[in-house]
Amino acid sequence: MRACLADDVVFRSPVAHKPYPGKPITAAILANVIEVFEDFHYVRELGDDAGHALVFEAKVDGLDITGCDFLVLDDDGLITDFMVMVRPLKAASALAEAMGARFDRIVEQAGQG
């Protein structure tokens, strides 16, 4: 996934208020969230010249979660904006808790700690 990210990508988390700019932090977040999710798989793709929406399903802490990755690409096909939305609230809360527990490690992996 790292190779698909532009250097200036901005990651917009479904559970954090501020965006995370840059390839290192975005790659670290994605590397950790794929460990938190169980049975992650994409179920649908929508797209046009402005970007793509990839609908996914997974489990987090035993709870079903559905989400969508909204991707904006640059002229080279690299992701410049990566926004995630998830539902339902109980699963989103479990995701927030699991990722929060890993946040220090994520920052360290990104070389920002």
Image (tube, rainbow, N blue to C red):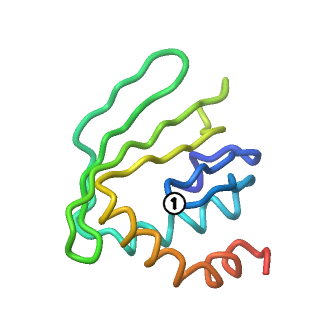
Residue in the foreground of this view, choosing between 42 and 99 = 99
Q: Is residue 56 left or right of residue 49?
A: left
Q: Is residue 16 left or right of residue 88?
A: right
Compared with 107, 81 (above or below) is above
* Residue 35 image position (x, y, % from top left): 39, 74
Crowd class of label 1 (few under 14; some 14 to 19; many from 20; radius 10 Å)? some
Q: Quadrant of residue 55?
A: top left
Q: Quadrant of residue 17?
A: bottom right
* Residue 82 image position (x, y, % from top left): 56, 44
Quadrant in which the C terminus appears: bottom right
Compared with 3, 33 (above or below) is below
Q: Is residue 90 left or right of residue 64?
A: right
Compared with 82, 110 (above or below) is below
- Describe the element under mark 1 as helix, strand or loop: loop
Outermost residue on the top side: it is 49
Compared with 96, 48 (above or below) is above
Residue drawn where x is 38% and y is 74% of the image: 36
Residue drawn where x is 45% and y is 68% of the image: 33
* Residue 90 image position (x, y, % from top left): 30, 65
Residue drawn where x is 51% and y is 25% of the image: 51
Outermost residue on the right side: it is 112
Residue in the foreground of this view, choosing between 86 and 40 = 86
Residue drawn where x is 39% and y is 68% of the image: 93
Residue underneath mark 1: 15
* Residue 102 image position (x, y, % from top left): 54, 82
For the image, the number of numbered tags is 1
Q: Is residue 21 left or right of residue 44?
A: right
Give amino acid for label 1: Val
